[in-house]
Amino acid sequence: MGADVAVLGVGMHPWGKWGRNFVEYGTVAARAALADAGLDWTDVQSVVGADTVRCGYPGYVAGASFARALGWQGARVTSVYAACASGAQAVGAARAQILAGLADVVLVVGADSAPKGFFAPAGGDRPDDPDWIRFRALGATNPAYFALYARRRMALYGDTPEDFALVKVKNAAAGAANPNARYRKAVSAREVAESAVVADPLRLLDICATSDGAAAVVLCSTDFARSRGVADPVRIRAVSTITPQYPRTVPDLPDIGTDPAPPSGPVPGSFRSSLARDAYEEAGLGPEELSLAEVYDLSTALELEWYEDIGLCAEGEGAKLLREGATGPGGRIPVNPSGGLASFGEAVPAQALAQLCELTWQLRGTAGARQVPGARAGLAANQGLFGHGSAIVAVAGAR
């Protein structure tokens, strides 16, 4: 099931908070990816845009918005929204077009102009909208449910705020070496502990910010890559975008209810772990073969949970893996060598694409000061609201 597609080019617009139009950021990233691929815009046969819901109608039709900004040239166009998994689902759509023979070259772009502060639902009363309900009925802001996950880890596994702070220290040090990161300053565990409490036990430096930014990738068939003289490109070997299964013994907040199918027995692991399992099965490799991983560190505590979900360690052993240095620079399996969301912040439709950019640079051996030596295979994983999730496995050429 599945086949490889090549990553011919990647590009980003540095992340920050400028308040400009998201299309401006996405166009910069797209042109950077095309230049990296050695292609002209007119070589692109299809454009897939990852949507943003915060930028008006152009954000809802992001594929067309980016194609218009680059100059109408007749390419196919697709727009995809899947909350924080939008970028990966856009990659999945592009990959499907290539494997179906509908296009040889597809440009995938995601960009956002985020509001200040933490995300809130769009205005208006929508009692049938689960995102509206969780804010209005439960008061479950994003930091609130990040904190509930953290408390659960503390109660079940003995994790401590000091463990959570070590995640921030690790990711901030990596982000300091990344020219595209918004926050490029190392922090100490003491600075994390002295930052303001946002949702106990999480402090301000435990939680990612909201950001502006963009990322883009140029995907193509392996035959097209060879025709351009690229014999061994980085390849996407799997894209997992499956939905949860019922019954779910631990709700994936902010969900507050589940529409069940008839249960067929206990479901092993969490929704997030099922994303990784599906990707490994399609890619034909396991977590022990990874050189690095990029995971969705909305909070420091959530990164520890991802270690377990993607199979780097057993349940409850994420903090131990971190303390041993296994997930840091020079460790057995570096996690978030880009600096993660701790260093970038959330630019929602661009996040999974930014992860794929980092995997590509690492697998090419061109990541500079953050390079993981000998990187051969990597996984990127994130989760969007209400049953959206993604995991991408990429491998170095000729693997």
Image (cartoon, rainbow, N blue to C red):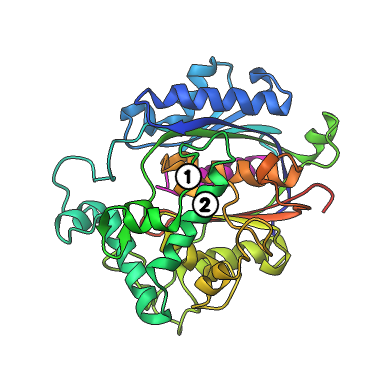
Magenta region, residue range: 80-100
Classify residue 35 as left or right of residue 185: right
Q: Which mark is residue 20?
A: none
Q: Which residue is mark 1?
A: 343
State the image coordinates of residue 38 (x, y, percent, origin top left): 74, 24
State the image coordinates of residue 91 (x, y, percent, origin top left): 58, 43
Q: Residue at x 24, y 55 (%)?
A: 141
Name the secondary structure under disc 2: helix
Q: Are marks 1 and 2 in contact (CB under 8 Å)?
A: yes
Depth check: give the residue in front, 309 or 365. Answer: 365
Q: Main secondary structure of the magenta part?
A: helix
Residue type, mark 1 in image: Ser
State the image coordinates of residue 323 (x, y, percent, origin top left): 55, 69
In the image, is residue 360 above or below residue 104? below
Q: Which residue is mark 2?
A: 171
- Is residue 162 a member of the stretch shown in magenta? no
Which class describes the residues within 10 Å of circle 1: few (<14), some (14-19), or many (20+)? many
